[in-house]
Amino acid sequence: MPECQKNLFDIPSDVTYLNCAYMGPLPNETVVAGQRGIQVKQHPWSMPTANFFPDVVRSKALFASIIGAKSDDISIAPSASYGIATAAKNLVVKKGQSIVLLDEQFPSNVYAWRRKARETGAEIKFAKRRDDYDWALSIVEFIDENTALVAVGHVHWTDGSVIDLAKVSRACKAVGAALVIDGTQSLGVMPFDVSLIQPDFVVTVVYKWLLGPYSYGYLYSAPKRQNGIPLEENWITRKGSDNFAGLVDYVDDYGPGAERYDQGERSNFALTPMAIASLELFEKWSVHAVADYLENLTDKAADAAITLGLSVAPKQARSPHMLGIRLNGQDPQAIAAKMAVAKVIISVRGTAVRIAPHVYNDEADIDRFFNVLEDCLRP
């Protein structure tokens, strides 16, 4: 993928959209796929019962290929919090043990663990951001024989600083702690392989970096975690559920692998085809190619920020696709509002102005961002 892919999206020429970490735009092909799905529901008399199954299988297979998993390891989840809640329900935490999270972690990967700690008498420990951005070192310092689990992302959502998951995983394995990963801000744009990291659970949604629809996502469960208790008991996850006439013959056995964790109404006839259309683009591009393309843009942005005397994470601590820029005393909310007037769209998260380009951006977008930023920074 050597070139900008803006032609695949409906983005006006006067808009510089650098906010994929907030919401990814839908590719044109994905919109068409969703419209076709809506038309299926519009004419249900033409819809065979087979429509409930093949697209789900295809959707899971596409996502599995992104993380080096098997299709049977994947279940459908409507949100990151749904996946995290499934993990929390199926991980044992005892009184006096600890749960390790990141400071200022996204709340969907915090609230379930707070409940778990209250219910079990466990303690939550928050690893702090170091001056050198070595998140893994901060996390590992908290991991000991009393650690029940670590729940983190691959990057910090506020500024894109990277967590060395291999180092964290080794520390977890050494004491028997579980590892839960929220990949919402990294999967699809950063290489990730479950065989290398060996997490217990990985969750992501598709509406950000995977450029898919809202309210659709995936949960990876390690094989040893696939015999747990789902959040809901629905009919379609049972063996033989494709025999509609036999659904009154109640079956306790679930389908293979992690299928038991699928959300109810997983076949969503509009969202599933949309997710497939978006993931098929990543199948063409490859995650490594996307990461390389975006790294060129964020490196250019980091160099320009440093030239202006602004603060960014050091190169070794940065993700390829997201950059937090700290304005050294300027109000980031005010700056972001001024930039929005100029149709340069970014976010403020924590104390950082966050830029998050994707394949529809190019170097001209980075130049425009800094031209407008310089104007906004002038007294």
Image (cartoon, helix red, strand yellow):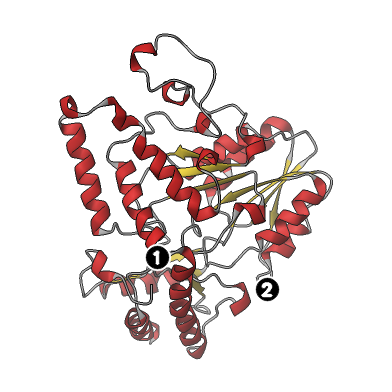
Residue situated furthest bottom in the rendering: 307
When the figure is inspected, residue 323 is found, relative to residue 93, above or below; the finding is: below
Question: Can residue 105 be seen at all in this image of the molecule?
Answer: yes
Question: As rendered, which of 316 and 41 lies closer to the eye?
Answer: 41
The residue at 25%/64% (across/down) is 9
Mark 1 or mark 2, whichever is nearer to me? 1
Q: Which residue is mark 1?
A: 285
Per the rendering, the mark at residue 131 is 2
Question: Can residue 216 be seen at all in this image of the molecule?
Answer: no
In the image, residue 371 lies at what x, y percent?
A: 34, 86
Question: As rendered, which of 51 and 292 lies closer to the eye?
Answer: 51
Quarter of the image for the C terminus: give it: bottom left
In the image, residue 155 lies at what x, y percent?
A: 57, 62
Residue 26 left/right relative to 174: left
In the image, residue 36 lies at what x, y percent?
A: 20, 43
Under circle 1, the secondary element is helix
Question: CB under 8 Å between callouts 1 and 2?
Answer: no
When the figure is inspected, residue 124 is found, relative to residue 136, above or below; the finding is: above
Under circle 2, the secondary element is loop
Residue situated furthest top in the rendering: 249
Q: Earlier in the sequence, mark 1 or mark 2?
A: 2
* Quarter holding residue 3: bottom left
In the image, residue 153 lies at what x, y percent?
A: 58, 55
Q: Residues within 10 Å of mark 2 (few under 14, many from 20)?
A: few
